[in-house]
């Protein structure tokens, strides 16, 4: 039931927070064990399923997942039996691998065999051809987890072969009193011959479980002293995810279970880890840094922001998640001494600074990308992959993330993160709390393109680009500019304009970031716009480049949650202005383009096309103020998107010019 691949770190913060603290029910090892499954495992026969004309290149015959949860941790038995149907499947199924923590996990390999007619070929042979390596998959993301990988290359694999692969993982979490979880997700190509799930837990181990839409209805029964949850179905496909839906609706075909009673229990168990790590020694140099900040201002918001910048700028990011490092934060003094740390270490250091400065603060767990619908899931540590600080000043919450860099402009310039839910870590326990993310009050991206053809339509025209970026857009783009050599950054900016406007030559590029964090970029040069004759009207006209268009909402196939709303790009606020300075103060010129307000797409789009004081002006303002678009509105939204794609922006000269 527990699939290692489902827990592989795929993002920086995930590797930082949860990669380490897994403890086997027996002694962990730096190599797999080789033995039959435990006696409680029910060994299933291989289904007799013939490959049909619609079978994928590798056909799953059996997907068997059996687990036991108790006070000592969890044991997960997994078995996959697949047939190679087409030659392309030889590469897809030609190797097998399994990763584990050598200090806190135990892996037992049961079977890797080829069934070829009446012949059974043992590929394990007691580990003869099993290669064990340490492969840091997130090294380029500054994350080390110390996990080992057992890899096996299948020899003499042929079309028609049936591959039988089975193993067991034993796991527990001692830092959290062996509270464990179990996630099962349906995921295979085509139909599976037999899909089975068995989850058992003892009487003294209460379990909370939930099945999402599209997952077969489990049967729960008492079997002796254990409770057993069972699913056993045949000839079933992986449920289709609803295209374009918010994350909470994308979670189809899932079963999740946890031995945590509620979110408050997780909060209580993790809080002492952070409280202890944030304690400072009497002569701690962190105290001196806090005193220095305190001497600069009495304003708690100024102090808190200075502490955040100190953690961002002075502590480089590096995740060391070996051993207990996945859950256990490094002490604040240690982090300051070595000048590196992951999100846990940076959070602890920031907590220590804020408490020295008299600012109320607490650590909060979040999910950096999958927070939508977190309140609908079972309580478990694995539901989170990041930790940040919430500071409270004047009755207002400020969310501080020490892993970021480049924040400017003070605490009030920081917007709440988009994580949606947070779990405060408190000794008394806490429940999930929503993170309110209001719409943007200012455009995060403004562009102004000004073309001056007042000297004549066929003469070189001065051109100027102004870009103004705020908030996250400014912070992210500033980091790109600062990381590149000046010449390379200038080339990148120029190419961003001229790759679709070959009639422009840019000569100067300047940029600067204001004290409030706003990034301003200015580029100037000359242009030779093409004024073409419109034969039908008998006038020359200049067609502007089409604006960036919103993608259409995809149509959905039938399946679970197919009536879900569509996710919008929230929050979003942009402004685009194109100005063309005309000859003769614009007399006789006309413009064509979009105009008016439209909210059909879920965004409020305001367009205007006009001539003002001899300048042709085309403006588009787009604001997204809601997270989702109802399904009933999608057809009208796509019609509005098609209409916008057909719009042209044109400046027409008077006849004879």
Image (cartoon, grey):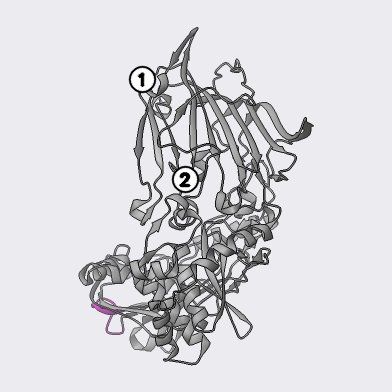
Say whether residue 458 is magenta. Answer: yes
Q: What stretch is highlighted in magenta?
A: 454-464
Task: Check residue 593 in the rendering and tell me which mark sits there, or answer none.
Answer: none
Q: Out of 301 and 206, give the one closest to the viewer.
A: 206
Q: Which of 214 and 511 is in front in this view?
A: 214
Question: 69 above or below 386?
Answer: above
Q: On screen, 508 above or below 83?
A: below
Principal secondary structure, stretch drawn in magenta:
loop
Quarter assignment of residue 526: bottom left
Q: In this view, does 415 lie to the left or right of 513?
A: right
The answer to whether residue 235 of the structure is visible from this angle is: yes
Q: Which residue is tagged 2?
A: 8
Regarding residue 544, the answer to whether it shows in the image is no
Q: How crowded is mark 1: few (under 14 residues within 10 Å), some or many (20 or more)?
A: few
Where is residue 193 drawn, in percent x and y? 61, 23
Q: Which of marks 2 and 1 is nearer the N terminus?
A: 2
Q: Distance between the residues labelled 2 and 1?
A: 26 Å
Against 203, is 482 above or below? below
Residue at screen point 59% across, 57% down: 638
Tell me the tag on residue 155: 1
| Quarter that holds the C terminus | bottom left
* Position of 243 relative to 466 (above/below): above
Residue 214, image x and y in percent? 68, 40
Q: State the image coordinates of residue 316 (x, y, percent, origin top left).
A: 35, 66
Residue depicted at 34% across the width and 88% down the height: 584
Asked if labels 1 and 2 touch by Cβ distance under 8 angstroms, the answer is no
């Amino acid at each position: 039931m527990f699939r290692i691949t489902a827990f592989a770190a795929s993002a920086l913060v995930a590797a930082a927070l949860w990669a380490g603290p897994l403890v086997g029910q027996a002694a962990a090892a730096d190599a797999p064990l080789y033995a039959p499954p435990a006696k409680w495992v029910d060994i299933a026969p291989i289904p007799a399923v013939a490959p049909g004309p619609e079978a994928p290149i590798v056909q799953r015959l059996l997907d068997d997942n059996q687990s036991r949860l108790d006070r000592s941790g969890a044991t997960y038995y997994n078995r996959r039996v697949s047939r190679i149907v087409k030659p392309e499947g030889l590469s897809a199924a030609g190797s097998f691998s399994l990763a584990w923590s050598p200090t806190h996990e135990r892996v037992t390999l049961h079977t890797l065999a080829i069934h070829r007619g009446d012949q059974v070929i043992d590929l394990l042979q007691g580990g003869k051809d099993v290669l064990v390596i340490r492969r840091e998959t997130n090294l380029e993301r500054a994350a080390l987890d110390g996990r080992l990988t057992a890899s096996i290359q299948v020899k003499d694999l042929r079309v028609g072969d049936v591959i039988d692969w089975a193993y067991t993982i034993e796991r527990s979490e001692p830092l959290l009193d062996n509270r464990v979880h179990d996630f099962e997700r349906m995921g295979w190509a085509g139909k599976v011959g037999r899909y089975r799930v068995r989850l058992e837990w003892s009487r003294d181990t209460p379990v909370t479980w939930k099945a999402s839409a599209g997952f077969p209805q489990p049967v729960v029964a008492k079997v002796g002293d254990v409770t057993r949850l069972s699913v056993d179905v045949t000839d079933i496909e992986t449920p289709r995810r609803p295209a374009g839906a918010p994350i909470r609706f994308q979670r189809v075909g899932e079963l999740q279970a946890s031995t945590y009673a509620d979110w408050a229990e997780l909060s209580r168990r993790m809080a002492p880890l952070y409280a202890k790590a944030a304690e400072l020694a009497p002569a701690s140099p962190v105290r001196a840094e806090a005193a220095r900040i305190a001497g600069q201002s009495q304003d708690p918001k100024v102090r808190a922001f200075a502490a955040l910048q100190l953690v961002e700028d002075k502590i480089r990011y590096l995740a060391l998640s070996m051993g207990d490092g996945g859950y256990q934060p490094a002490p604040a003094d240690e982090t300051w001494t070595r000048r590196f740390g992951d999100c846990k270490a940076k959070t602890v250091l920031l907590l220590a600074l804020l408490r020295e400065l008299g600012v109320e603060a607490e650590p909060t767990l979040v999910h950096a990308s999958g927070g939508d619908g977190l309140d609908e899931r079972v309580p478990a540590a694995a539901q989170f992959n990041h930790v940040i600080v919430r500071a409270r000043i004047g009755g207002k919450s400020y969310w501080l993330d020490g892993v970021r860099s480049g924040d400017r402009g003070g605490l009030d310039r920081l917007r709440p993160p988009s994580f949606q839910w947070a779990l405060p870590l408190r000794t008394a326990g806490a429940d999930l709390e929503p993170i309110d993310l209001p719409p943007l009050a200012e455009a995060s991206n403004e562009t102004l393109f000004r073309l001056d053809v007042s000297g004549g339509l066929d003469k070189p025209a001065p051109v100027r680009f102004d870009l103004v970026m705020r908030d996250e857009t400014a912070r992210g783009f500033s980091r790109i500019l600062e990381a590149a050599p000046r010449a390379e950054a200038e080339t990148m900016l120029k190419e961003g304009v001229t790759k679709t406007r070959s009639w422009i030559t840019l000569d100067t590029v300047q940029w600067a970031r204001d004290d409030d964090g706003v990034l301003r970029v200015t580029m100037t040069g000359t242009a030779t716009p093409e004024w073409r004759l419109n034969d039908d009207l008998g006038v020359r006209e200049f067609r502007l480049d089409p604006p960036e268009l919103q993608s259409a909402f995809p149509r959905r196939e039938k399946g679970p949650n197919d009536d879900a709303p569509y996710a919008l790009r929230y929050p979003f606020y942009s402004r685009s202005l194109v100005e063309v300075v005309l000859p003769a103060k614009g007399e006789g010129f006309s413009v064509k383009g979009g105009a008016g307000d439209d909210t059909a797409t879920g965004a409020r789009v305001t367009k205007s096309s006009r001539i003002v004081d001899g300048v042709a002006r085309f403006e588009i303002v787009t604001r997204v103020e809601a997270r989702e678009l109802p399904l009933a509105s999608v057809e009208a939204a796509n019609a509005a998107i098609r209409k916008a794609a057909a719009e042209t922006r044109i400046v027409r000269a008077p006849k004879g010019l």
